[in-house]
Image: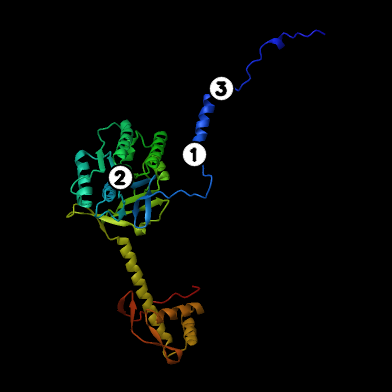
Amino acid sequence: MIFDLTDQCRPVPNLAAPAASDAEEGNKARLAKLDQCRLASLENPPERPPMILSYKDKRLGEAGSIVVIQGKAKSGKTAVVGAILGAAIGGEGDFFGLESPNPHKKAVLHYDTEQSRYEHFDVLDVSVRKRAKFADIPKHLHSYTMLQLEIGERWKTIQADVERRAVQHDGVHLVVLDGVADLVNDPNDPSGSFSLVHELHAFADRHQCLIVVVLHENPGAGSKKTRGHLGSQMERKAQTSISVEKNGSTEIVEMHEVAARSCSWPKKEAVCFQYDAVARMHVTVDNPNAMLAAENVKKAEAEKALALQSLAKKVLSKPLAHGEFVKAIMAESACKDSTAKSRIKEMSGKLKIVEKIDGGLYQIVAEVAEVKGQEEELQPLPALTLPVEGV
């Protein structure tokens, strides 16, 4: 057999690995970024971001997050924006209870896409002079009306300005976008809306500032849905969504959260404000719902005190020992032993309807009982009865 060894004498080709493709290089870069985001240990927890906007002990907005101010047209959203700006520049005035401490005077930036130059001036005049009590606009507050800018240029211009002011003021404290829907061509376009929300969130995180956006709710009574895909995505990403709602009959505006990650601020605890013609701005007023609730509680306590006095008069025609007193109440009210003892405790407590005398006996001592710090004459009401258990 004859072998042809010609091929064995030819040069051996280079068997080294081929050059990595562009896709592989791209994946390496992506994975390197992902590795930087990995949580590998629980031994060194990150510091909680500083609070930028709060109400009492409620953390509404932290550095790196978004807060939504939402409401119907002409509901009072601009007044809330003015209060937030006033608090952030370090003023002392009526900010509806909102706080935004900024001791190092980092940049406070306000971009308005809806107001004319005259209306924009009025907003700043109220916020700075009337509300925050400054003589003029402080150097770390920069406010713009953007009506003259093309929609496609607005967000790019805002980013450039934020970068500029971050250098000028050694950081950014707060960015307010009053009319964020005007930064996109169509708030119902999911692609453009989702992209803007992502960029806003990443921008807030990079600058460790809070971004407050103002959104309109859809028309219609009871609707809390904000405009389009932009509103839906913004609500999903926001740390807190704050509702601003005007009562058409009283003109009182209620402010509370409708969605929050870090606090609970229900409608029953809403901050209320109303336009004051003398002050020429919105001012804080008492919450009428809270006042009504307090009145109802007081009324219920007074009625209960009357019912307990009526019960005591029926069963204490003569002094009784504790055990006999319990049995008498159980028979009269058709209640359990524990309930009867609880009613005796109330009668002998702050209401002072009965008292213990020598021998451990109980007797009626007064026709007057103290309810919520006020003395009210307690006369039996025939139609008023305590609840009967099991009914």
Task: Work out whether 336 lies above or below 39.
Answer: below
Residue 36's label in the rendered image is: 1
Report x, y in % for residue 12: 66, 15
Q: Gap between marks 2 and 3, in whole Å?
A: 49 Å
Q: Mark 2 near mark 3, Cβ–Cβ under 8 Å? A: no
Task: Work out whether 302 lies above or below 74.
Answer: below
Front-lying residue, 188 or 174: 174
What's the amino acid at mark 1?
Gln
Residue underneath mark 3: 19
What's the amino acid at mark 2?
Lys
Sequence-wise first label, 3 or 1: 3
Task: Work out whether 254 lies above or below 2.
Answer: below
Q: Is residue 247 left or right of residue 383?
A: left
Residue underneath mark 2: 106
Residue at x-position 32% and y-position 34%? 160
Q: Bin the neighbour count of mark 2 within 10 Å (Cα to Cα): few under 14, some 14-19, many 20 and up.
A: many
Residue that lies at the very extreme toward the left in this rendered image: 278
Label 1, secondary structure: give it.
helix
Report x, y in % for residue 139: 23, 43
> Does residue 336 appear anywhere in the picture?
no
Front-lying residue, 2 or 100: 2
Sequence-wise first label, 1 or 2: 1
Residue at x-position 33% and y-position 78%? 370
Report x, y in % for residue 354: 39, 84
Report x, y in % for residue 25: 52, 27
Q: Gap between marks 1 and 2, in whole Å?
A: 28 Å
Label 3, secondary structure: give it.
loop
Q: How many marks?
A: 3
Q: Is residue 139 left or right of residue 62?
A: left
Label 2, secondary structure: give it.
loop
What's the amino acid at mark 3?
Ala
